[in-house]
Image (cartoon, coloured by chain):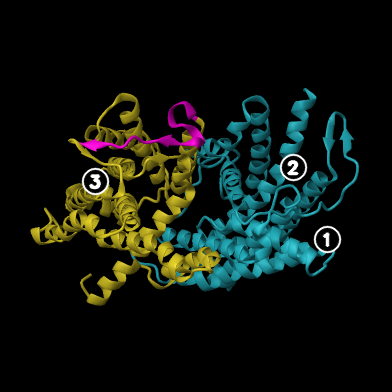
């Protein structure tokens, strides 16, 4: 393998890890509410800004801006579910797809978040968060890695591991899974279904926010950086859109594929890649690349 | 409601046609531009509402067909000298055919998956508009030649206004006939329940594909309308923001009804203008207010404004 190829794969894995985190956020919401969260990208953006404000204005140490931003965005996500979505679902009109109203609700939230950030005068200029750790780049064979990149991968993997443990071993995690599989049965065994839905939204929002802080040193923070959600959607679809491990694999596949297309086809084609991937995967393997067989969703 | 729409309903269009010919004499150019824009969006919204409100298919590709219609009409005229009256129907047909081609595979997908696949198609189409610069002019855009219709020169806001009013009126009539036709009722049946629809002998896939194709043709017609009053087109016109605006319009106005779509277009189309004039200096709040309106609309008016009004009058 050529060094160029190895380098492309390595940096693809780094960006892929962040895509995976955002994809996880989207899928957790989808599994809980059957809706695509079009405000997911704005939650990422908000995470970046909250991290920056905490660092610059509140003077928090770098490590503490993660829980700070996660907590604030958790509350926003949970409130949105409780205040808006509960009401939208509760007032469902027979014969009319509830999905449309819910999606318009999330689009509304995305405008609100973007608008709220834009109102702060500080955001008129493009900003960049300082890197978590700097230092001489590390050489692994022919591949050069920045400290920053390693920190991103380590943080992303730690978060994924924590999520896995949360969903596998904790009572709340198990209750969330049960609610997603069958809300009525979950309610019958005494799980507070509404609370679970709020938790899922909060958790998903917090994940997106943390991904925003991880991205902030690499990308520029602007109120419009939410468009990154498209890449996360593609990653989630590659993974089948209902599987959390699928998201992780999908994110990394997408990150690597994008880099390889940039290397071997053309840099212009990079932006087309996610959409082609979405269409091809949905039409040929709607269950995702990694699932065994098609699983029909219960009606 | 079955059969042809009653004449009394068709008569409601008379004010639109009269306004189309009278207003260009009265209003300043900026208002006419706004009116043209709203009439074009009204055709787009009627088309999307057929697919989403009547057939219940949640698709995001509408704006791509709008782009195809715009570029096709403009290019037919610039490159081949095809006059507008032939070019626009051809462009609408092309959009419809592509809609059919997308519709058939896409009808295998449901709800979120359909939304995502069509969303990806729309983004890919915008990428093509940008990248195929030999034909579309790429990001630099394309200059549209002022079309003429049977010798009547169009291309400015006052001259285009009556033409757009006529096209909109025709499209509203077409929608009235379509929604009360057998196909229209089949679409409603599919929206309510695909199982029941197919058990009653409706070919679900064919009906969905037709809904896709017809909806795409509306967008193609709107694309033709665009070339009547704009002298320039670039790919930014067909971005994600536009499809969101369009979706918001029909949801806020009320899905599955012609007045609902028109009300939504007028309201959300004029809202930025109203905010620009009343909130001068507070322009920065515009996005926030817009988002709150969307959230409020889905929270408090699940049937949209028209559903709210109709519910009050007890006519539904």
User: Is residue B133 a member of the stretch shown in magenta?
Assistant: yes
Query: Which residue is painted at 45% across and 42% down in the image?
Result: B122
The colour chain B appears in is yellow
Query: Which residue is painted at 34% across and 59% down in the image?
Result: B265
Q: Secondary structure at mark 3?
A: loop
Image: magenta residue range:
B132-149
Circles 1 and 3 in contact, beta carbons < 8 Å: no
- Residue B107 has which mark? none
Circle 1 residue: A62
Q: Secondary structure at mark 2?
A: helix
Q: Residues within 10 Å of mark 2 (few under 14, many from 20)?
A: many
B147 or A256, which is in the foreground? B147
Q: Secondary structure at mark 1?
A: helix
For residue B105, which quarter of the picture? Answer: top left
The colour chain A appears in is cyan
Mark 2 or mark 1: which is in front? 1
Q: Residues within 10 Å of mark 1 (few under 14, many from 20)?
A: some
Q: Position of residue B306 (x, y in %)?
A: 29, 67
Residue A22's place in the image compared with A15, above or below, is below
Query: Which residue is painted at 50% across and 57% down in the image?
Result: A35
Q: Position of residue A260 (x, y in %)?
A: 67, 30
Q: Earlier in the sequence, mark 2 or mark 1?
A: 2
Chain of residue at mark 1 = A
- Residue B202 has which mark? 3
Q: Position of residue A22 (x, y in %)?
A: 64, 52
Mark 1 or mark 3: which is in front? 1
Label 1 to label 3: alpha-carbon separation: 61 Å
A24 or B178, which is in the foreground? B178
Q: Horizontal placement of B127 versus B262: left or right?
A: right
Query: Which residue is painted at 42% across and 40% down in the image?
Result: B233
Quarter occupied by the N terminus of chain A: top right
Circle 2 residue: A14
């Amino acid at each position: 393998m050529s060094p160029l190829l190895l380098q492309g794969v390595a940096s693809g894995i780094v960006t892929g890890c962040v895509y995976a985190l955002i994809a996880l956020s989207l899928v957790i919401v989808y599994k809980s509410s059957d809706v695509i969260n079009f405000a997911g990208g704005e939650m990422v953006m908000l995470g970046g800004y909250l991290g920056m404000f905490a660092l610059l204005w509140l003077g928090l140490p770098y490590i503490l801006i993660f829980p700070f931003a996660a907590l604030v965005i958790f509350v926003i996500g949970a409130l949105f579910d409780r205040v808006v979505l509960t009401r939208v679902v509760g007032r469902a009109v027979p014969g009319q797809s509830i999905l449309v109203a819910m999606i318009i609700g999330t689009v509304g939230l995305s405008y609100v978040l973007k608008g709220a950030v834009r109102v702060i005068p500080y955001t008129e200029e493009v900003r960049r968060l300082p890197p978590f750790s700097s230092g001489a780049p590390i050489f692994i064979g022919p591949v050069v890695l920045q400290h920053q990149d390693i920190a991103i991968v380590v943080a992303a993997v730690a978060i994924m591991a924590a999520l896995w443990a949360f969903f596998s071993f904790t009572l709340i995690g198990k209750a969330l899974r049960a609610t997603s599989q069958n809300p009525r049965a979950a309610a019958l065994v005494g799980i507070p279904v509404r609370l679970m839905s709020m938790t899922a939204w909060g958790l998903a929002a917090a994940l997106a926010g943390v991904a925003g802080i991880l991205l902030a040193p690499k990308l520029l923070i602007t109120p419009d950086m939410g468009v990154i959600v498209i890449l996360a959607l593609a990653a989630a679809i590659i993974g089948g859109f209902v599987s959390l491990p699928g998201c992780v694999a999908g994110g990394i596949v997408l990150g690597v594929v994008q880099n390889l297309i940039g290397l071997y086809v053309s840099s212009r084609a990079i932006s087309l890649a996610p959409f082609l991937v979405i269409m091809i995967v949905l039409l040929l393997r709607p269950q995702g690349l990694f699932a065994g067989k098609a699983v029909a969703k219960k009606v | 409601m079955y059969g042809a729409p009653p004449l009394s309903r068709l008569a409601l269009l008379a004010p639109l046609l009269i306004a189309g010919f009278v207003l260009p004499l009265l209003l300043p150019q900026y208002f006419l531009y706004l009116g043209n824009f709203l009439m074009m969006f009204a055709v787009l919204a009627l088309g999307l509402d057929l697919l989403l409100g009547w057939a219940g298919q949640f698709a995001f590709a509408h704006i791509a067909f709008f782009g195809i219609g715009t570029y096709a009409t403009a290019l037919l005229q610039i490159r081949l000298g095809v006059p507008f009256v032939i070019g626009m129907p051809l462009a609408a047909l092309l959009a419809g055919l592509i809609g059919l081609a997308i519709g058939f595979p896409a009808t295998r997908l449901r709800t979120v998956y359909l939304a995502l696949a069509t969303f990806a198609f729309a983004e890919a189409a915008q990428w093509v508009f940008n990248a195929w610069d030999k034909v579309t002019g790429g990001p630099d855009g394309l200059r549209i030649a002022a079309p003429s219709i049977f010798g009547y020169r169009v291309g400015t806001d006052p001259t285009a206004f009556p033409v757009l009013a006529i096209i909109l009126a025709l499209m509203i009539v077409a929608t009235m006939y379509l929604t009360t036709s057998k196909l229209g009722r089949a679409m409603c049946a599919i929206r309510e329940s695909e199982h029941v629809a197919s058990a009653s002998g409706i070919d679900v896939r064919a009906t969905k594909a037709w809904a896709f194709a017809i909806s795409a043709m509306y967008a193609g017609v709107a694309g033709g309308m665009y070339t009547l009053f704009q002298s320039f087109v670039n790919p930014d016109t067909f971005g994600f923001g536009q499809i969101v605006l369009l979706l918001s319009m029909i949801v806020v106005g009320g899905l599955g009804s012609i007045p609902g779509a028109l009300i939504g277009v007028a309201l959300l189309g004029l809202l930025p203008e109203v905010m620009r004039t009343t909130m001068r200096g507070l322009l920065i709040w515009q996005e926030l207010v817009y988002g709150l309106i969307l959230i409020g609309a889905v929270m408090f008016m699940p049937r949209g404004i028209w559903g709210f009004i109709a519910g009050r009058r007890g006519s539904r």
